[in-house]
Amino acid sequence: MQPSTANLVEPIFDRTLRLREAISLGHVDDLLTVRNELKELLNRVRNGEERFNRQRSTDYLGLSYPLACWIDEIMTADAVVGSVWNEMKLEGSLFGTNDRAWMFWRQSELAETIGLQDDVAVFYLCASFGFSGQFSSEPGKLLAWMQRCRLTLGLVPELRLPFANDLAPMTDVPPLLGTKRLRHASHAAWTSAVVLLPVMSYLLVTAWTR
């Protein structure tokens, strides 16, 4: 992942995960204030993409879309604040839609088609940190999608999984060649689990900025 991309998305992951931790400890922040803070961070992502002249298509919504979907999903699923967050979802505010369950996956396909590997990495991190959308009741398909992303990103060796043939074909995206250190780390992690833990996924992807 390019440093410019990491600098845009890392504050959003960090702020959202800190919010979730606070809620789990019973320290519920002013949700409207935090939501507006996250919305501003998402707008910075959109502005940053324009500033760096990132390639776009008329259908692709950019990096802020998967991030908004991820935030909305994990917040609306929360037993404490879910019903409140459901009334102020970021996807609706920023994009005027309520289609994250399937649109997230469609946007990830477009990112692959355009060849935006940093964006694919962000989709992968969102899924690693809890987004499942229409795959919420089909964990095998979610696992197959995540394995496909790892192959696209050059994180792990190929492993044949059930449901892999049910997904859309891989697009012709140039392979990302990581450093020797990253390859060794990812291979070691793969020996211990089929699905990388979210924190390990985050470390592996953001390691490209080092």
Image (spheres, rainbow, N blue to C red):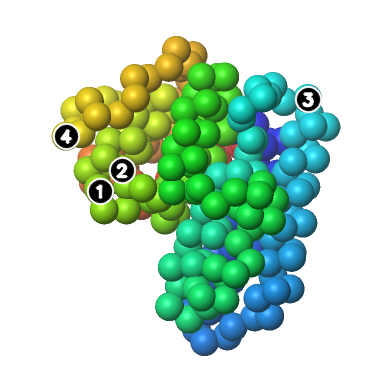
Q: Earlier in the sequence, mark 4 or mark 3?
A: 3
Q: Position of residue 18 (x, y in %)?
A: 58, 69
Amino acid type for the residue under numbered disc 3 = Asn
Within the image, what quadrant is residue 15 found in?
A: bottom right
Residue wearing tag 4: 162
Q: In the rendered structure, which disc, 1 or 3, sits on the residue that comes first in sequence?
A: 3
Quarter of the figure that contains the C terminus: top right
Viewer-side residue, 209 vs 92: 92
- The answer to whether mark 4 and mark 1 are in CB contact below 8 A is no
| On screen, residue 74 above or below 121 | below
Q: Quadrant of residue 89?
A: bottom right
Q: Which residue is mark 3?
A: 53
Instruction: Note whether 169 is above or below 197 in the view shown.
Output: above
Q: Earlier in the sequence, mark 4 or mark 1?
A: 1
Q: Residues within 10 Å of mark 4 (few under 14, many from 20)?
A: few
Q: Secondary structure at mark 1?
A: helix
Give the crowd class for mark 3: few <14, some 14-19, many >=20 residues within 10 Å: few
Contact check, label 2 and label 3, Cβ < 8 Å: no
Q: CA distance from mark 4 to mark 1?
A: 10 Å
Residue sitting farthest toward the bottom? 26
Say above or below: 169 vs 185: above
Q: Which residue is mark 1?
A: 139
Question: Looking at the picture, how far across and down is residue 176, in whole percent?
Answer: 49, 21
